Image: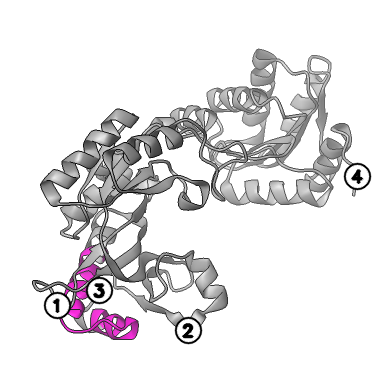
Amino acid sequence: MNIHEYQSRELLQKFGIPVPPGILVQNPVASEKAFDELQKRHGSKVCVVKAQVHAGGRGKGGGVKLVKSGDEARKAANDILSRPLITPQTPPEGVPVMKLLVAAGVEIEKEYYLAITVDRVSACPVLIASSEGGMDIEEVARTKPEAIIREPISAVAGLRPYQARKICYFLGFKGTQVRMAGKIMHQLADLFLKADANLAEINPLVVTKATDEHPDGTVLALDAKLNFDDNALFRQDDVVAFEDPTEEEPAERRAKQFGLSYIKLDGEIGCLVNGAGLAMATMDIIKLHGSEPANFLDVGGSASEEAVTEAFRIILADKTVKGILVNIFGGIAKCDTIAKAIIVAAKEVGFTVPLVVRLEGTNVEPARKILEEAKGELPTMEIGSDLTDAAKKITALTGAPAA
């Protein structure tokens, strides 16, 4: 589950991580008032107007604008809100912007990158830091890998003090910056573990210019991105409260209501599969035989009649779908039970596109017999003897060259 930047800032503050003040707005007039308010309360001479969407690279798409007056803030807000935001992480047509964050600007001396995520190889959280903040970490890893440090974090003990000091010295923090930056690292690790996060990223983490009060400057989180484990949301009420349904694909939101895992893709062959690994293999073999999957859809191990019916409805609601490949391995739910559910669902939903069904597992022979007997009622349905045969059939029926 993703959340907006303004919500991420709220969580950072809850865990004691300092961020510049900001005000959430939804229209240009409110942006102008927010600038004036930040100037009045915090002496902000410069503010940043930032689009609030679940996508990175907002600055590259014109979704982040520096402003020096209330009038500029209003104009910037009007520009951002008036058109879809297109970034490297959005669909080609972009996404609508409904909310803006007007945040106080700070005088930056140096930018850093700081994040915690899960290392799938070591099976533990890892803190990643770089002295090259404000950039895509992938680009830094490609062009300047020596600027990145990785430090594993114990899921029980958290980040240890010596690890924080090691990272601070690697990044070049000095004087009181070490204490401030180290504290932020500990607090970010605390947030990551207690909130069941998959990703807790601060980019950039900044050191502000020196002042008489702070001769070494101060360390602040200027921007943040948080992502959470969906499987742990049952114990994260505060995180669930941040959910924004308008940022989700409608079909994905609908699928979630029926316990389905669905992700829309750009191809033409709809996939209905039970099991995430089998779904990935199904998409791979569709591509191998010359076509493209239109979705990832996992109906789960039980694959009930209701779930299968809704899955068909969701797939067929996508007008780019030219055919459907059903690939089910009968285990908890037996193949004959699944075959009956497919037939009932297909009749209820109605099919005008080719449907190829491949079943394997418990009671597969009775299941194939059930499907054969139903072919007269479902003229667009064909049966695949195995996954390769099924993939070849559906790609041929939808016009892709058989490989």
Circle 4 SS class: loop
Which disc, if any, is residue 402?
A: 4
Give the residue number, with chain letter if any, for mark 2.
146
Please tell me which residue lies in front, 215 or 273. 215
Relative placement, left or right, of 295 versus 257 is: right
Q: Are marks 4 and 1 in contact (CB under 8 Å)?
A: no
Q: Amino acid at mark 2?
A: Glu
Calculate the distance from the C-alpha at mark 1 to the C-alpha at mark 3.
28 Å
Give the residue number, with chain letter if any, for mark 1.
215
Q: Which residues are magenta?
A: 163-188
Q: Are marks 4 and 2 in contact (CB under 8 Å)?
A: no
Relative placement, left or right, of 52 versus 338 is: left
| Rendering coords of residue 290 (x, y %) | 84, 47
| Rendering coords of residue 388 (x, y %) | 82, 48
2 or 3: tag closer to the N-terminus: 2
Characterize the magenta stretch by its predominant secondary structure: helix
Dot 1: within a 10 Å radius of its alpha carbon, few (fewer than 14), some, or many (20 or more) residues? few
Give the residue number, with chain letter if any, for mark 3.
159
Nearer the viewer's eye, disc 2 or disc 3? 2
On whether residue 361 falls in the magenta region, the answer is no
Please tell me which residue lies in front, 39 or 344. 39
Nearer the viewer's eye, disc 1 or disc 3? 1
Calculate the distance from the C-alpha at mark 2 to the C-alpha at mark 3.
22 Å
| Rendering coords of residue 209 (x, y %) | 23, 71
Circle 3 SS class: loop
Relative placement, left or right, of 318 versus 377 is: left
